[in-house]
Image (cartoon, helix red, strand yellow):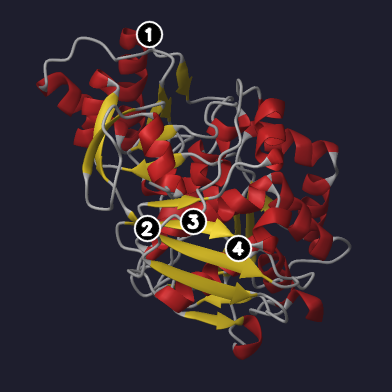
């Protein structure tokens, strides 16, 4: 039977013969992940199960990135609980202090995930690792507790939507724009419990960081996973990061898809998701004088070095609008260090940006950028639900790093080419 990428990866980890969509299969896990919000719940369930140890101290990662540096007593207690559990279990991959980064940027950077892996995490954006050719998906904390104890979990084999992306990209159009455009086409439930498999000439040309950006937002279309083939670029990236023996992975010729979506990007403008759903997408040129109070550059979607470079290119020699708070959060300490070495942090600070530590922070309305009633934000994050960044009476727009930088300068959402 010819297999999709999802079926092929699941087969690598299952003793069952992986067949058609809807089949239930049991699979060994390559990595189990939780953070400072979800890990405490998983720990409670782990205890109730009577588990005495994790299945593999090297294959459980606990990353305290959502409310760190701790914003209040409650968040400090959450992290304390995770810290003590990590010490008790001898978990190797525990991150909290100067080594912590936004989890879905940190794990690939450390070579902890790669092609053909199955990664489950108590965080919906675990699907990011599909950019490396891994079957990666979010789960509830109880399922994660079981996976931490057993090293395996079950899946319903998903149907797959094939997304063929072709054409010629405009210099201001990025992978973030492509995934927003796709979500605008199929809707926030268009890929419900389906895998999105990305192909086409644009995918072949796309660098790995852009692929991870797109895979990250598969969940915003309801996707179980967002998958890219693991090609020569993937193998080179993973080898550089220290991942052992990465292999190329492609879907089989003749694999069956439940739907195919073709996108020709030629002439496509940067895209913006308007309040209050990621599928309320418009070309940036369609938005007229939408003033903002805040701009956020960062998150597991767009806090990588490529994203910082794109924003700095727009911002260099310019100033942030006096009525705008421009918050820049590099996704990991290494990215922060690289941005320092390349002079990007200097560009941001001279422009009047607020540069903070690696943290999820404002993305989930946690801290370091909460919106007041009536305020509006343009963010490079992944969600713009009502109240996502603070007040229920605030608004969040989603855009690329280039759109973010241009908006910070203009004080209103604008095409990067116009600044």
Q: CA distance from mark 2 to mark 1?
A: 34 Å
User: Which structural element holds mark 1?
Assistant: loop
Q: Are discs 3 and 4 less than 8 Å apart at CB?
A: no
For residue 51, side relative to residue 331 (left or right): left
Toward which corner of the image does residue 181 lie, by quadrant?
bottom right
Above-or-below relation of 345 to 402:
above
Residue 200 in the image, given as x and y percentages of width and height: 63, 62
Q: Which residue is mark 3?
A: 197
Residue closest to the eye, 39 or 280: 280
Graded by Cα atoms within 10 Å as few (under 14), some (14 to 19) or many (20 or more), the crowding at tag 3 reads: many
Residue 393 in the image, given as x and y percentages of width and height: 36, 75
Q: Which label lies toward us, 2 or 1?
A: 2
Q: CA distance from mark 4 to mark 2?
A: 16 Å
Task: Give residue 223's mark.
Answer: 2
Task: Give residue 90's mark.
Answer: 1
Q: Which residue is mark 4?
A: 176
Q: Quadrant of the C terminus?
A: bottom right
Q: Which label lies toward us, 3 or 1?
A: 3
Q: Are discs 3 and 1 less than 8 Å apart at CB?
A: no
Residue closest to the eye, 103 or 211: 211
Q: CA distance from mark 4 to mark 1?
A: 38 Å
Residue 161 in the image, given as x and y percentages of width and height: 42, 63
* Residue at 62% over, 49% down: 303
């Amino acid at each position: 039977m010819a297999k999709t990428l999802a079926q092929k990866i699941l087969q690598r980890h299952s003793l069952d013969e992986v067949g058609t969509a809807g089949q239930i299969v049991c699979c060994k896990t390559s990595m189990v992940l939780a953070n400072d919000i979800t890990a405490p719940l998983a720990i409670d369930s782990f205890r109730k199960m009577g588990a005495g140890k994790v299945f593999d101290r090297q294959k459980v990662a606990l990353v305290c990135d959502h409310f760190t540096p701790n914003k209040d007593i409650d968040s400090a207690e959450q992290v304390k609980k995770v810290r003590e559990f990590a010490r008790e279990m001898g978990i190797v991959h525990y991150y909290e202090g100067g080594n912590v980064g936004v989890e879905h940027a940190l794990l690939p950077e450390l070579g902890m995930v790669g092609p053909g892996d199955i990664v489950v995490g108590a965080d919906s954006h675990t699907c990011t690792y599909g950019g490396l050719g891994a079957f990666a998906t979010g789960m509830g904390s109880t399922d994660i507790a079981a996976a931490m104890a057993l090293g395996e979990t079950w899946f319903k084999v998903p149907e797959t939507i094939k997304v063929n992306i072709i054409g010629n990209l405009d210099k201001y159009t990025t992978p973030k724009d492509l995934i927003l455009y796709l979500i605008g086409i199929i809707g926030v439930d268009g890929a419900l419990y389906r895998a999105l498999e990305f192909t086409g000439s644009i995918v072949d040309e796309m660098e790995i960081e852009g692929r991870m950006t797109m895979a990250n937002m598969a969940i915003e279309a309801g996707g179980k996973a967002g998958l890219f083939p693991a090609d020569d670029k993937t193998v080179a990236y993973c080898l550089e990061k220290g991942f052992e023996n990465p292999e190329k992975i492609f879907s089989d010729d003749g694999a069956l898809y439940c739907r195919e979506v073709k996108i020709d990007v030629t002439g496509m403008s940067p895209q913006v998701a308007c309040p209050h759903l990621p599928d309320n997408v418009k070309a940036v040129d369609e938005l007229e004088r939408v003033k903002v109070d805040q701009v956020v550059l960062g998150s597991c979607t767009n806090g990588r070095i490529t994203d910082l470079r794109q924003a700095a290119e727009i911002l260099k020699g310019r100033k942030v609008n006096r009525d705008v708070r421009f918050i820049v959060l590099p996704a990991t300490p290494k990215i922060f260090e690289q941005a320092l070495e390349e002079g990007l942090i200097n560009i941001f600070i001279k422009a009047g940006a607020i540069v903070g530590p690696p943290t999820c922070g404002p993305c989930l309305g946690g801290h370091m950028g909460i919106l007041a009633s009536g305020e509006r934000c343009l963010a490079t994050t992944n969600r713009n639900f009502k109240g996502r960044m603070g007040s229920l009476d605030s608004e969040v727009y989603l855009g690329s790093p280039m759109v973010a930088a241009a908006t910070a300068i203009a004080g209103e959402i604008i095409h990067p080419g116009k600044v």
